[in-house]
Amino acid sequence: MISSELLLEAYCRGIFPMGLENGEIGWFSPDPRGILPLDSFHIPHGLRRTLAKNRFEIRINEQFEAVMRACGGREETWISDEILASYVRLHKIGYAHSVEAWSENGLAGGLYGVAIGGAFFGESMFHYETDASKVALVGLITRLKDRGYTLLDIQWVTPHLQTFGAISIPKKEYLRLLRPAVSKTCRFV
């Protein structure tokens, strides 16, 4: 298992781990780095319609391990047993969190990540029901804005996250944003 101290120190330096195919842990610090600016977050029109129907209830940290397992439940995943155990322990000490979308059928989708100071490091998302992970993302953004967070790190930009306003920035600029963000005092829960 990766120690919680090592994980937190790595995040504060812009580095994160991923399980590799050979069973080892790789450490990454991409350049450019993906972020989702909180002040320019965009909700696509179709998702606005979903939100208006109130099909999902947002819950925080109710099923953290189940969210991680769902995120890793793909044919190819970087969420190894070691990564899972390390983040479950990080959750137990108050740094890793899940944002969950629940429907009448139960856990419908969600995401998890790490919160340090005023920075949230998004790790992965999943959905069992259409739009559930997107609703969880809106829930995350609302929480981060309401609680004074300044940085949402998404590691790499995907076409899916671009629809919400995600951008890539040079690593040097990312580190310039990271230092004051992790020094802030914010409470995720």
Image (cartoon, rainbow, N blue to C red):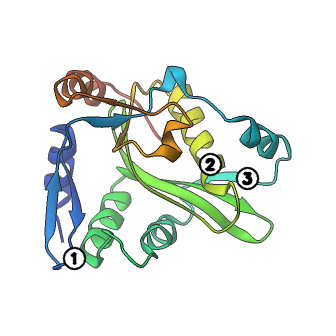
Q: Quadrant of residue 102?
A: bottom right
Residue furthest right in the image: 53
Relative vertical location of residue 9 with respect to residue 126 in this rendering, above or below: above
Q: Position of residue 162 (x, y in %)?
A: 49, 37
Query: Would you say the residues marked 3 and 2 are in contact, meaning their CB atoms lie under 8 Å apart?
Result: no
Query: Would you say the residues marked 1 and 3 are in contact, meaning their CB atoms lie under 8 Å apart?
Result: no
Between marks 2 and 1, how big is the CA–CA gap?
A: 28 Å
Q: Residues within 10 Å of mark 1 (few under 14, many from 20)?
A: few
**Which mark is in front, 3 or 2?**
2
| Mark 2 residue element | helix
Q: Which residue is mark 1?
A: 21
Residue at image point 60% right, 29% down: 42
Q: Which residue is mark 3?
A: 57
* 66 to the left or right of 118: right
Between marks 3 and 2, how big is the CA–CA gap?
A: 12 Å
Task: Quarter of the image for the N terminus: give it.
Answer: bottom left
Q: Amino acid at mark 1?
A: Glu
**Viewer-nearest residue: 122 or 60:** 122
Q: Quadrant of residue 44?
A: top right
Residue 24 shows in this picture: yes
| Mark 1 residue element | loop
Q: Which residue is mark 2?
A: 134
* 45 to the left or right of 139: right
Q: Amino acid at mark 2?
A: Lys
**Which mark is in front, 2 or 1?**
1
**Viewer-nearest residue: 67 or 4:** 67
Relative vertical location of residue 58 with respect to residue 183 in this rendering, above or below: below
